[in-house]
Amino acid sequence: MSAETRHGAETESAAPAAPPLFLSGTFSGKFDSKGRVILPPAFRQQLSGTVYGFPSFTEEVVMIGDQRLRARLVAAAKSFEAVDAASPALTAFQQKIVQDLQPLSVDDAGRAVLSQKLKDHARLNGALVFAGRDHHFVLAREDVLQSHDDAAAAFAREFGEAFAARMRPTTGEGS
């Protein structure tokens, strides 16, 4: 059994650890007439249990994942305790993560209902895009992800040769 921390209290969980995720690719989306969005099957198939939505602290996107996303967010917040465990700001930050992490209602067809808070955070309307981010995926407006693509392209132009060199096998790694 593994110990799980929720709202600062230890609880026992018999659930086996889920395998690591690798969510990649991009998929178009839109809200239906009832305000639901269909989660891409390629992503949905890798999720298990409760699906969560979280408003990113750094981007106008909604992070989406399962208990592994929840665990990573909580662990990242706890990691700051080494800096100042008694900090009221850290406590507020940790509590904010827990309160903003929202279980999503997902039906058998993969249609998810997002809260108005999540929609407002990412200013979701019109053309939407789902993008894999390895251990979770994001839902964003098309223009937000286009600006990320533009920034990535600029970086690749500047550092592409160095990246390619780092991708080459070193001696002993094979051909």
Image (tube, rainbow, N blue to C red):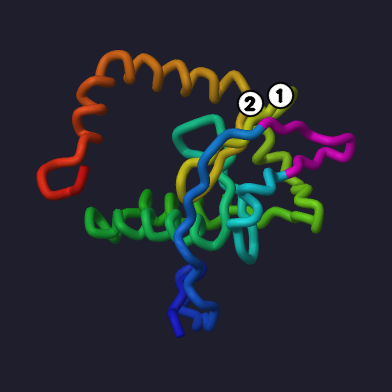
83 horizontally vs 145: left or right: left
The answer to whether residue 159 is above or below residue 70 is above
Q: Residue 21 location, x and y as percent?
A: 48, 55
- Reading the image, the residue beneath label 1 is 127
Residue pictured at 88% horizontal, 40% vertical? 34
Q: Which mark is residue 65?
A: none
32 horizontally vs 76: left or right: right
Q: Counting other residues with Cα less than 10 Å from the Cα at mark 1, is it few (<14), some (14-19), or many (20 or more)?
A: few
Secondary structure at badge 1 equals loop
Q: Are marks 2 and 1 in contact (CB under 8 Å)?
A: yes
Question: Toward the viewer: 134 or 162?
Answer: 162
* Region in magenta: 28-38
- Reading the image, the residue beneath label 2 is 141
Question: Toward the viewer: 73 or 94?
Answer: 73
Earlier in the chain: of badge 2 and badge 1, it is 1
Secondary structure at badge 2 equals strand
Q: Residue 45 location, x and y as percent?
A: 64, 56
Q: Amino acid at mark 1?
A: Ala
Q: Residue 61 location, x and y as percent?
A: 56, 34
The answer to whether residue 58 is above or below residue 69 is above
Q: Amino acid at mark 2?
A: Arg
Q: CA distance from mark 2 to mark 1?
A: 6 Å
Quadrant holding the C terminus? top left
Residue pictured at 65% horizontal, 40% vertical? 118
114 horizontally vs 68: left or right: right
The answer to whether residue 108 is above or below residue 1 is above
Q: Say whether residue 37 is magenta.
A: yes
Residue 96 visible to an observer of this rendering: yes
Which residue in the rendered view is the most extreme toward the left? 171
Residue pictured at 25% horizontal, 35% vertical? 167
Residue 121 visible to an observer of this rendering: no
